[in-house]
Amino acid sequence: MGLTFVTDPVSVSTPATSANLGPGFDALGLALTLHDDLTAWVTDAGFSVEVSGQGAGELPTGEEHLVVRAMLRTFDELGERPPGLAVRCVNRIPQARGLGSSSAAIVGGVQLARGLVRGGLDLIDDEAALRIAAKIEGHPDNVAPCLLGGFTVAWTEGTGARAVRLDPAEGVRPTVFVPAERGYTATARAALPSEVPHRDAAFNAGRSALLTHALTSDPSLLFPATEDRLHQGYRAAGMPGTTSLVAALRSVGVAAVVSGAGPTVLALTEVPGDFHPGAAWHGEVLGVDGAGAVVKGGMVEHAERGPVAAGRKS
């Protein structure tokens, strides 16, 4: 017996994410209250994508769009594709800035596909959805918090990606500083050495363990917990503005790190009101998204959500 596709549209809001968080390279991630809103429905034939906001006029509008590719991969896992798909994307997550825009598209596609199949949320549970998303993305550090919300620790074993979700403490105050220029994960990864000193690996192991405690129980320890020796220093020459801003924030006691592969900077503790990053940066105070990418019926009311859920601009 084949699948039964629902006739009504389904929607999902996918949160931006910040991975690594300093020492937790390719493992730790945080979901943020900045969202892309996606809606999809089954059609008689073909693939069409309407994009507004971030990426409009740049992203593919057919089968090559990452949301559609993730949907098709998920339908293949379920055993059958629909005859056609229409997708509407309202994007607020900046593209190629280290805030998980590709993970938001991938997780959104997986969730939309699950929602368009009757019983799809049971046929593919969250663990399987994470494995599918991580296979497409190549690593689980962003897709895990995007799917599950909150603070996540992700890893890969024989069966694929796995993750645990934890609730951040009340004192965690994410602020992002987003530049106009873009950065690309492949370029940032190319700057990393194939081997690192054992003392640096040991340093990061300790800081990653401390960061898990600081994020969930004692934010007063976030400053030492966000120290890193595995990736940020090696990438510094390729994004000098990011490196300078991280240093400036840390010089005034802010637990600041490179968000993902950059160039966005993430601060996890409150930024002083008189701190000015400069005209090249757009600062936004965000919250931690606790829900992750939740499937909903019907069309998303895009107008009811602003550019961010809460914030202070600088």
Image (tube, rainbow, N blue to C red):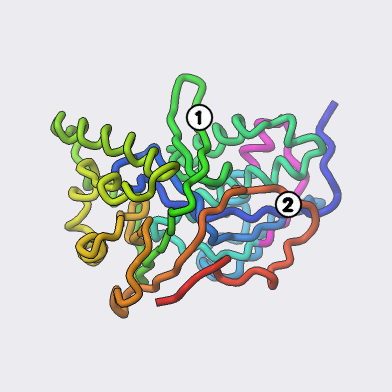
The residue depicted at 80 percent of the width and 35 percent of the height is 119
**What distance separates the C-alpha of mark 2 from that of mark 1?**
29 Å
- Which amino acid type is shown beneath numbered disc 2? Leu
**Few, some or many residues within 10 Å of mark 2 (<14, 14–19, 20+):** many
Q: Is residue 83 left or right of residue 7?
A: left
Determine which quarter of the picture holds residue 262. Answer: bottom left
Asked whether 308 falls inside the magenta stretch, the response is: no
Task: Specify whether residue 102 is in view.
Answer: no
Task: Specify whether residue 309 is in view.
Answer: yes
* Foreground of the two, 194 or 243: 243
The residue indicated by pointer 2 is 85
Q: Which mark is residue 162?
A: 1
Vertical arrangement, residue 67 with respect to residue 163, above or below: below
Looking at the rendered structure, the secondary structure element under dot 2 is: strand
Q: From this viewpoint, which residue is outermost toward the bottom? A: 279
Percent across and percent down for residue 42 are 78, 50
Looking at the rendered structure, the secondary structure element under dot 1 is: strand
Percent across and percent down for residue 300 are 73, 62
Q: From this viewpoint, which residue is outermost toward the top? A: 158
Total marks drawn?
2
* Foreground of the two, 203 or 270: 270
Percent across and percent down for residue 239 are 24, 61
